Amino acid sequence: MKSYIQISNKIKKFSKTIQVSGDKSISIRCVLLASQAIGTSKIYNLLESEDVINALKSIKKLGINYKKLKKYYEITGFGLTGFNTNSKIKIDAGNSGTFARLILGLLVNSNNQITLIGDKSLSKRDFSRVTKPLEMFGANIKSHNKNLPVKIIGSKFLRPIEYSEKLGSAQCKSAIMLAALKTPGITKIVAKKSRNHTELLFKSLKIPIKVKNKKNSDLIEIKGHSNFKSFNYSVPGDISSCSFFIVLTLLSENSKLKIKNVNTNNSRLGVLKILNRMNANIIATNKRSYKGETISDLIIKSKKNLKGINCPKNLNSSAIDEFLIIFIAAAKAKGVSTFSDLGELNKKESPRLNIAINFLKKVGVKVLREKNNIKIYGNPKLYLNGNFTMKNFRKDHRVFMMTCIAALSLGGKWKIHDRDSINSSFPKFLNIIKQLGAKIN
């Protein structure tokens, strides 16, 4: 198989119904919590991507068995002390920042040194936001200049902590919450608003947790050393995966799309709120509640008159994984779109803010930047005729998918490298794009 794809034509109008793969954030959390439960858990619609498979392989190294059956995965846990850490183990997180940071929280009571490694991209990401609070619990952690590899030796004398999480990082917050499970007493977290899948899973599993929601933060208390039973869980569709098809539909003429069974958790709705403020036509229907999460079907119709937005900063954390594709919508909108305080984008799988700005300039869009704030001068008549190549983006799956949507929406002849990057989060991406009628070679 070629390492690149070629797109030579804009997508034609379509009217389709699709369903995307399971939510990656929830899939990884389900794997980790099932490994700590007592008994055999069944997880349906688990995302079968490299990130999640790496999570499964890692818990197996730690003594937890899993089995893939026709409709679900079985994971058999032995409680909060069920990991086998009686010998030195090396865990490979691949490209997954979520898994890498969260698993450290569960290793704060390990008996021996566990070494966490990752791929070239993950090894450049800052782990100090997680290692700092985990050391406060009593774990002994060494890193390579705040990066991977990270070596952790747990403690038998863990102590609960009080921690103020100011970055709006769900990964940091969740790592602390998982460490709190292993720790006697009550751990308290003041966390800047971020996605709340871990809190909802804790509540559904009847883990002792109290959450007080304030305007810009959440107060979280967790009582540790509380074993919980195995569970069944059906993972809803990933709204981050949906966002690419949403923008493709908005920018395609006379098109309509229905996406079924999407996780529309309010802490993940930033992309919908931003696009609807830009005059998009996105409707959530058939809403229902599932173990604290909200599930909906999304209906999207193409829109000729998207308008620029002065994006409120309070929507950043709930759209942090979708900004790349939001920028493509802004490039075709009428007027200027302003986005601020987006430094967190450069701490993802690649320096996404830098890459996005260079990409927009490459396709003829005027962009002004001041530190981590940008202005995108939209052009509703933007249409590309030339030849374009996209490569050297650290194999970031979201950059690859953004480029595909830009090519299908804006025109031009494209050669897009690193097609395998999508295997980390959304292996079925190109298959669904082809279902919509796209010509991809």
Image (tube, rainbow, N blue to C red):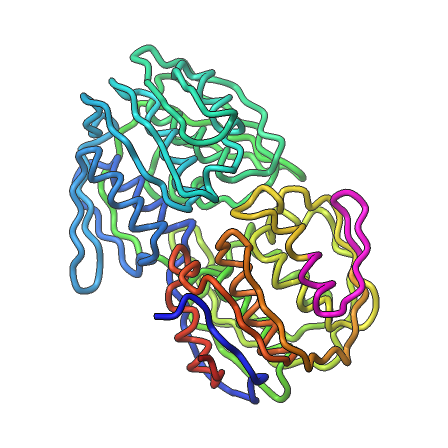
Query: Can you give x and y, in whole percent of width and height, for residue 161 in the image?
Result: 48, 17
Query: Can you give x and y, in whole percent of width and height, for residue 380 in the image?
Result: 77, 77
Query: In the shown orientation, is residue 390 left or right of residue 275?
Result: left
The image shows residue 112, relative to residue 213, as above or below, that is above
Query: In the shown orientation, is residue 278 left or right of residue 51?
Result: right
Per the rendered image, the range of residues in magenta is 357-375
Residue at x-position 38% and y-position 17%: 139
Q: Which residue is more in the foreground, 317 or 37? A: 317
Residue at x-position 45% and y-position 60%: 238
Residue at x-position 48% and y-position 71%: 297
Query: Can you give x and y, in whole percent of width and height, for residue 382 in the image?
Result: 74, 77
Quadrant in which residue 246 is drawn = bottom right
Residue at x-position 57% and y-position 75%: 414
Image quarter hosting the C terminus: bottom left
Query: In the shown orientation, is residue 94 left or right of residue 14?
Result: left
Quadrant in which residue 403 is drawn = bottom right
The image shows residue 289, relative to residue 385, as above or below, that is above
Query: Can you give x and y, in whole percent of width and height, for residue 107 in the image?
Result: 32, 26
The image shows residue 255, relative to residue 64, as above or below, that is below
Q: Which residue is more in the foreground, 349 or 334? A: 349
